[in-house]
Image (cartoon, grey):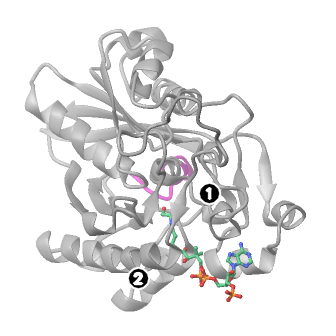
Amino acid sequence: MAIKVVSTGRAIPPKRVTNEDLAAVMDTSDEWIRSHTGIGARHIAAEGVAASDLGFEAAEDALRYALDQGLVAEKNLEELAATIDLIVLGSSTQDYYSHPATACIIQHKLGAVNAAAFDVTVACSSFIYALETAAALLAADTRRKRAVVIGAEVLSAITNWEDRGSCVLFGDGAGAVLLEKRDGAGGLVRSILGSDGSGWEHLILRRGGSRNPWKKGEVVEQVPCIEMNGHAVYNFAVTVITKTIERFLDEEHLALEDLALIIPHQANGRIIQAAEKRLNIPAEKFYTNMEEYANTSSASIPIALDECNRSGKIKRGDLVLTVGFGGGLSYGGNLIRW
Ligand code: UT7
C-alpha cells in the first residue's frame, strides 16, 4: 500500500509587491533584501481575503488538475470532492482565532461532504506535519482513501509593517496536494518531525491566546503581529535543515544522487546556501522560488511542489525531499516517491 501524491495545485494573490515598492514606503532597499534573503517580490492578498479563500482555491486547483489530466476516474469536481475523506490544512493564519477550524470552511466551499476537516498549526512547518498526519490517517483505516492537504497563509494580516527586519520577508499564498491510498510501492516514504520548544519565544504572535487574552475595554495600540528573533531562527534553521537532510540520507541509505530534488521551506536563500555548503550539495539540487513569493510559511512547500510537478521538474518515480523549519521552534521533512 502506498500513499501517493496524485495531483497538486496553488493559489497566488494577483497583487505583486516588489522590493522597490517596499523601499518607496520604508527604510529598506532592493539590494539589502536580495543580498540578505534572496527575496525579490511577494504577493499580497486583497483586503478581506482570508486563508480559507486561498486554501480553497489551491485545493480546487489540485482537484481540477487531477480531472483535467485524467489522474482520477471521477468525471467532475462534485463527484471527486465527494470522495475525499480528509481535509487537513496547515496554517498559522487561520480565518478565526481558535475555532472553527479553517479546514471546515474549505470543506464546505469544496463540497467535500464526506470529509473530516481539521487544522494543523506548527507555524512554517505546518504543511510537513499535515502531510504526515493525513498519510497516517489514510493508512490507519481501510475505508479512508483520499485526502487533500493544504498549506494556506495570509501572513500580511499578522505582519508588523513597521518592523523592516521581518516585514520584508513574508508573502501570502496557498498550495495543495491530493493524496490517495493505492496498491503498490512509493508515495510518502517517511517523514521526520521534530521540535525544540526551548525556542518557543523566537517566533511568536503574543496576543489573543489564553496566556495573554484580550481584556474588556482595552485600548489596542499594536495589532497582533509576528515578533521574530531573526538570528536565533536563522541559526536554528541552518542546523535543523542540515541535520534533517543528513538523517534522511543516513537512515534511508540514500546517496545525494538518489534525490531528484530537495524542496526546502522558502524562507531565506542564505539558509539554503549554508546547508549546501555544510553538506556539499550542489545548488541545483534545491528548488527555490522565494525570489518571486518570499516566505509564505506553510504554503511555501506545496506551492513549490505544484510548480515542480506542473513544469516537469519532478516526474513520476522521482525521489523528492521536502525540508523545513518554523516557529515552535519546529522542523521536519517528507521523503516522497513521486
Ligand atoms: O519561516 C521562518 C521565518 N523566519 C526566518 O526565516 C528568519 C531567519 N532569519 C533571517 O533570515 C535573518 O536573520 C534576517 C533576514 C531576518 C536578518 O538578516 P541578518 O543578516 O541577520 O541581518 P541583521 O538582523 O543582523 O541586520 C543587519 C543590519 C542591521 O543594521 P545595523 O544594526 O547593522 O546598522 C539592521 O537594522 O541590517 C538592518 N536591516 C535592514 N536594512 C535594510 C534589517 N532589516 C533591514 C531591511 N532593510 N529590511
The response on whether ligand 1 sits within 8 Å of label 1 is yes
What is the distance, in whole Å, between disc 1 and disc 2 at their CAs?
21 Å
Residue 235 rendering spot, x and y as whole percentages: 41, 81
**Mark 1 — residue?**
170
- Does residue 336 appear to the left or right of 294 in the view shown? left
Image vertical order of residue 11 relative to residue 279, above or below: above
Magenta residue check for 311: yes
Disc 2: CA contacts within 10 A as few (<14), some (14-19) or many (>=20): many
What type is the residue that disc 1 sits on? Phe
Residue 197 rendering spot, x and y as whole percentages: 26, 63
Rendering quarter of residue 78: top left
| Viewer-proximal residue among 258 and 179 | 179
Secondary structure of residue under mark 2: helix
- Does residue 202 appear to the left or right of 194 in the view shown? right
Residue under the image location 52 percent in, 32 percent down: 55
What type is the residue that disc 2 sits on? Ala
**Mark 2 — residue?**
275
Rendering quarter of residue 124: bottom left
| Viewer-proximal residue among 258 and 333 | 333
The response on whether ligand 1 sits within 8 Å of label 2 is no
- Does residue 173 appear to the left or right of 130 in the view shown? right
Image vertical order of residue 332 relative to residue 78, above or below: below
